[in-house]
Amino acid sequence: MGSMLIKNAKLRGDDTLKCILIEDGKFKAIEEVIDAEADQIIDARGNLVTPPIVDPHVHLDAVLVAGLMTRKNITGTLIEAVGIWNDWAKGLTKEKIKENARKVVDWYVANGVLRVRTHVDTTDPSLLGVESLLELKEEVKDLIDIQVVAFPQNGIYAAPGYYDSYVRALEMGVDVAGGAPHLELTREDGVKAVEETYNLAEKYGKLIDIHIDETGDPASRFVEVMAKESINRNMGEISTASHTTAMHNYNNDYAHKLIGNIARAKMNMITNPFDNSVLQNRMDGYPRKRGYTRADEMLDRGVNVAIGHDSIMDPWYALGKGNMVLAAYLFYHMGQMTGASQVQQLFDMITVNSAKCMHLDDYGIEIGNTADLVIFDGRNEEEIIRLQSECTHVIRRGNVICETAPATRQLKYKDETVDFKL
Ligand code: FE2
């Protein structure tokens, strides 16, 4: 497989530039000076070198359909998007689902995203989406690691057949048991759905990642049930609560108690800045709140919180290009994550925190790990988020799989190019 030497690499949390030696697809040495021969030498020129970027929450079965649909989301709400999706998904073929998702895989690679967790709708009894994404996962495994979540888009008890197709999806070999308890018909069914998800995850040996309290309704309180199940069964570290946007609107006494229980359970949390900016609190009028979970409060209390992309050009959110640095940029503003240490946390939220949500081992620039990494066109986390820097090199198992030449801007009124870096 050959060898590679990366020189002048700025690693996170390390003030001294390092050399990184890769042999046979693994990190072999990380030192200030390495005098080794290598088949390929790359000069990182003092730029930040990080483990691959992670997207722990996307829906690859729905990507890119926004531009194809004849029926647009007029209200822009989540509920209308679900309705459009339910109609639209009936016409999708396996070829089209895979073609769209495959294109997004290329976008992810170009953006340095080499670990992805995708949800896939299980309420369609044909389970075409599940079949498509399980096939795709295998087909692209040399480029990117994908986890597949069985996601009952409309709940498991809200209509006949939903429960059965959800269980069949778990039996087809997905990695993660998902859910949507806030979309069950009653509070009682939602509680039962969370409990049953834990039962099934135990039975089939799955991780857990539930869409939960994805609404502006402050009465939606299903995360507390996840925390209870995680504590009682000691399953918090493999459990992730996605969205939890209702937490934005909880009263502070209840939120304080809940976050304590989430921390005690050692659960993982995911906020999705693109979708959460546009889908929740649509009924508010003004003042217009947003559907962000309490990421800063949870991080301060030791909870693992990550950022997901969620939608890429689908009925829920029509923009997006698989760029997690852009998601971090958005959350810098909307989550008020502007303190110096919070900028570091933002970068954690698209790397190590997300890797923890996905329960990944073999992640990180450490000797013996698989040599996956990204070289940015930027010297530190703040600069990269500020400029939304490109990844000049994306390296998978010791091979460069994408190279990007950053744009140059030639001023015509003087003989200079523009440099946004100071
Ligand atoms: Fe989602």
Image (cartoon, rainbow, N blue to C red):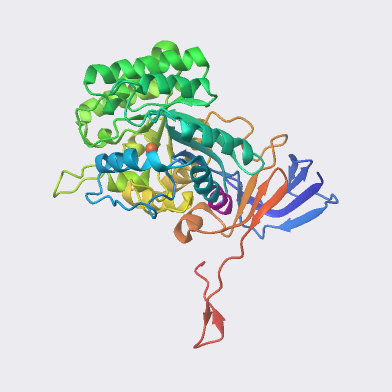
Give the residue at x 27% y 50%.
73
Task: In the rendered view, tell whether residue 18 sits above or below residue 57.
Answer: below
Q: Position of residue 292 (x, y in %)?
A: 30, 41
Quarter of the image holding residue 187?
top left
Give the residue at x 28% y 21%.
190
Task: In the rendered view, tell whether residue 165 sits above or below residue 352.
Answer: above
Ligand 1: quadrant of the figure: top left
Q: Quadrant of the N terminus?
A: top right
Residue 207 makes an appearance in the image: no
Query: In the picture provided, is 290 more to the left or to the right than 365?
Result: left
Q: Nearer the viewer, residue 232 or 279?
A: 279
Q: Nearer the viewer, residue 6 or 151?
A: 151
Query: In the picture provided, is 345 more to the left or to the right than 11?
Result: left
Q: Is residue 381 in the magenta section?
A: no
Residue 274 makes an appearance in the image: yes
Q: Nearer the viewer, residue 422 or 23?
A: 23
Quarter of the image holding residue 85?
top left
Q: Position of residue 398 (x, y in %)?
A: 73, 45
Q: Nearer the viewer, residue 204 or 239?
A: 204
Q: Is residue 110 in the magenta section?
A: yes
Q: Position of residue 95 (x, y in %)?
A: 53, 44
Which stretch is magenta? 105-111
Query: In the picture provided, is 209 more to the left or to the right than 288?
Result: right
